[in-house]
Every structure is written in C-alpha cells, then in structure tokens.
Image (tube, rainbow, N blue to C red):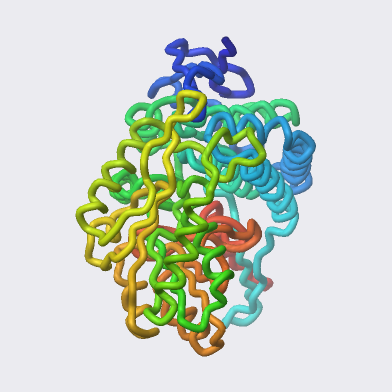
Amino acid sequence: MTKHTSYIGGKWVDFGNYKPNLNPANTDDIIAEFSYGDSNAVDQAVLAAQKAQNGWANATPQVRHDLLEAIGVKLADRVEEYGTMLAREEGKTIAEAKGETMRASQVFKFFAGEALRLGGELQSSVRPNVDVEITREPVGIVGLITPWNFPIAIPAWKIAPALAFGNCVIIKPAGLTPGCAHIIAKLMDECGCPPGVFNLVFGGGSTVGDAIVKHPAIEAISFTGSVATGNNIAEICGQLRKKVQLEMGGKNPMVVMDDADLKLAVDACLNGAFFSTGQRCTASSRLIVQEGIHDKFVKELTKAVTALKVGDPLDSSTQIGPVIDEAQLQSNLDYIELAKKEAESVIGGERLELTTPGYFQAPALFVGTTNDMRINREEIFGPCASIIRVKDFEEAIDVSNDTEFGLSAGICTASLKSAREFKRRSQAGMVMVNLPTAGVDYHVPFGGRKGSSFGPREQGRYAAEFYTIVKTAYVFAG
C-alpha cells in the first residue's frame, strides 16, 4: 500500500495516523493512505513558513516566476498520469480530469507571468516637491483550505498567486481528495521550492483546518467549501483581524427564453447541471423556462438526461462518473425523495448498481417545481436539476434573483435586449449568455455575491487584491 506524508519545511513528515483514500467508482480500489496531522503539525508548518517568509518575500520576481513556470510545465507534460489519478480519486470523467489538470498548469503559468508584472503607482502629491509611491507587498503566511470537487485546479488557483506575490503557504486539502495536493507538493519538491515556502498538512477540518484558521502567525485564510464552515471561518477571522476570502455555495439559475435556440439551450443546461456529476458550485440547479418553450424543452432535455451514460470515469465513453462518497450520495437520494413530494414529477435519480462497488446515481430532473420549494432553495450538490415555469422575462429575472446565493447565472436567448438586461440586473458575480453556468477562464476573476462569496475575487489579476497589501510611501525631495 502506497503511503503519503505531509510536506513541511522541504521535508516529508510522517505523523502516523494513516487514513485510506478510496476510488468512488470502485471502493475496492484503495488509491493510497495518507498520514494525518493535528494542530502540532500546523505549528511545525508555521515555524517553517516563518523561517522562509522574509527570503521569499524578497526574492526577485524571476525566482518566483521560474518556480511557478516549472510546475506549470511539469503538470502539462504529465497530464495523462495526473489526470488518471484525479479521475480515480474524485470520480470525474477522464476527459474532465485531464482538462482540470491542464487548467492547473495554465494557472501556474499565468501567475508565473504575474510575478513579473506586479506593479504600483507613482503619483504627484498635492504638496510641492513630494512624490507618492503606491506599492503592493506580500500579506505574509497564508492558510489555504481547499475542497474535494476540483482537487487540483482550486489548490492551483490559490497556491500560485500566493507564491507569485511573495507569500508562504500552508495548505490543507479535503480529506476525500488528498492525492492531488500531494502531486503539487511533489512538484514543488522537484522544482526546487525553497524549504518552508510551501507546506502541505493532511488532516481533518476540526483539527488541522481549525488550527490553520486560528493560528496567530497566519495572516490570511482562503477557503472554498460549505456555507456553514465558511460563515464560521469568517467570524473567527473577523475576531482575529485576518484577511479572509470565501467561496461557498450556489443555487444557480439558467433562464431559457421562448426565443432561445432549443438545441443550444438543452446542451447548455445538460452541461451546466449534470457534467462533473453536478458537483460544481457553479452548476445550473434551477432551470427557469418561459412557458412558450417549456414543454418542448422538457421533452428534449428529458431525452438528453436519460441518455447520459453513468459509469467508470476511466472509460472514455462515460459521461457521468460517481458521486464523491456514500454520505453525499445519501444526501442526494434524500433530496430526490423530497422532490417526489414537492415536484409534479421526478425523472431518474435512482442509485445505480454497476460492475464495481461505487457511489453511482442516475441524473435526476425535477419537473413542475416552484421557486419556494426546498429543492430550489437548498444546494443539493449532485446531478439534480429543477425546472421552473415562468410567464415572461420579468418573472424570470425575479425568480433568478430570488435566492440567498449569487455565484453564477445564465440565460439562453436570441434577444440582444434580454441578454443585456439579464447581464445588468442579475444578482450574480458571473453571468453567462448562451453558455453553461459552469465553466470559467483562468485569467479572469471568479466569485459571487450574497451567500456565495465573501472577500476579494479569486483568479486573474484580481487575485492580487487578496494576496497583497497596499503600501503608500511619501518622499520629500527638498
């Protein structure tokens, strides 16, 4: 059995307490065992980061660029190997897993460039012979807590900007998908990352995660995960005056207007709602359909959903992989039972027994729902979508915005006016027109509003807002 340990101060550190990591498509397949640390492990990581922070913050941009570029290149060169590992560990299809691995490569390469481009401002003072210089400096030691659903891309888009802008990192990956974070640690080691600049600690949220959030030497916390945990982290960080960045839930709407291209709308909704087994915070879980196209849309989407192939993610013909674990599958099935009481009809959704023991579920479509139902208020985080009938654009935008979340929203329409109005009035951080609500570029900001996100945006040049602090310097020339 392969055993993996934490990576602290440039060394692999064994804490014992090994826990297995299972393939959700075949629970007989134990991918590896991972050594879990505790608060003492976090203390060790912080000490290593403190020793490294000054040197890394003062390293030249070229040094930081070269490290990130080298990691990006190695990820791209090994996309087949790492994509297969990701598919086994998380359960997304091999095509999606390779795509995510390549996305991580692109993120590291992008921030390699940003390390060279970090600039400032030189302004004239209102006083004579005084210059004003505005610069960005590293925050310090940053704690990163990442989820299981994008186990290599999300760590990449947190780690890369943190290092690019001169911060040292302590990361705790999700317990369900530690292997992908271990890949990044191996690459850090291979590429000559200075000891203590990058530190990986495996462990539980209530132990390692809690210790990272509360440690007085960690200046900032970036978290992606559940709303409840994010709210708790925000409260703690507020009391400790730490910078905090949260990406949490979504109940994303996709509006389909009467004038939409039917095939385009079905394809966009199918992709947004069900690909990646619906385990995306940007998934289209509420399909808001104008009454004129409603019946045709339901008929065509039903055909498409029931034709999806659920199976082994390593099989290239599979379109939907397994749910991540038994607990998530049971939660999905509980919501499907609720939908049978709330919706007019439920299509699919049953647990599937395939050739290997795994957490397989048929995609579920809830037809004849209203926006006040629990299935349309609460995030399910599985291959489930509801259809809500509306009369016109005004009702569609009202229903779209009637949610505690505000991450992503979409509209399918041939009307430039409807598209423009939806972009302007949608209460979401990201808006898609004739595209799935899921699927974003790596060089532009990612994030939402209301209960979905808190703090500065992730990704792109906007990442500097979180991973740096602004200094204003005045010089009197005499």
User: What residue do we see at 52% from left, 75% from top?
Assistant: 412
Q: Is residue 406 left or right of residue 44?
A: left
Q: Residue furthest left?
A: 341
Along the line of sight, the residue nearer the viewer: 152 or 83 = 83
In the displayed structure, 414 sits above or below 185; it is below
Question: Where residue 232 appears, x then y in whole percent?
Answer: 29, 45
Along the line of sight, the residue nearer the viewer: 38 or 2 = 2
In the displayed structure, 182 sits above or below 239; it is above
User: What residue do we see at 43% from left, 25% from top?
Assistant: 203
Q: Is residue 88 left or right of residue 429?
A: right
Which quarter of the rendered picture does the N terminus lie within? top right
Along the line of sight, the residue nearer the viewer: 392 or 45 = 392
In the displayed structure, 60 sits above or below 195; it is below
Rendering quarter of residue 455:
bottom left
Question: Where residue 162 appears, x then y in whole percent?
Answer: 59, 46
Which quarter of the rendered picture does the C terminus lie within? bottom right
User: What residue do we see at 67% from left, 71% from top?
Assistant: 122
Question: Where residue 94 appears, x then y in whole percent?
Answer: 64, 38
Whether residue 120 appears in this view of the structure is: yes
User: What residue do we see at 59% from left, 24% from top?
Assistant: 9
Whether residue 457 appears in this view of the structure is: no
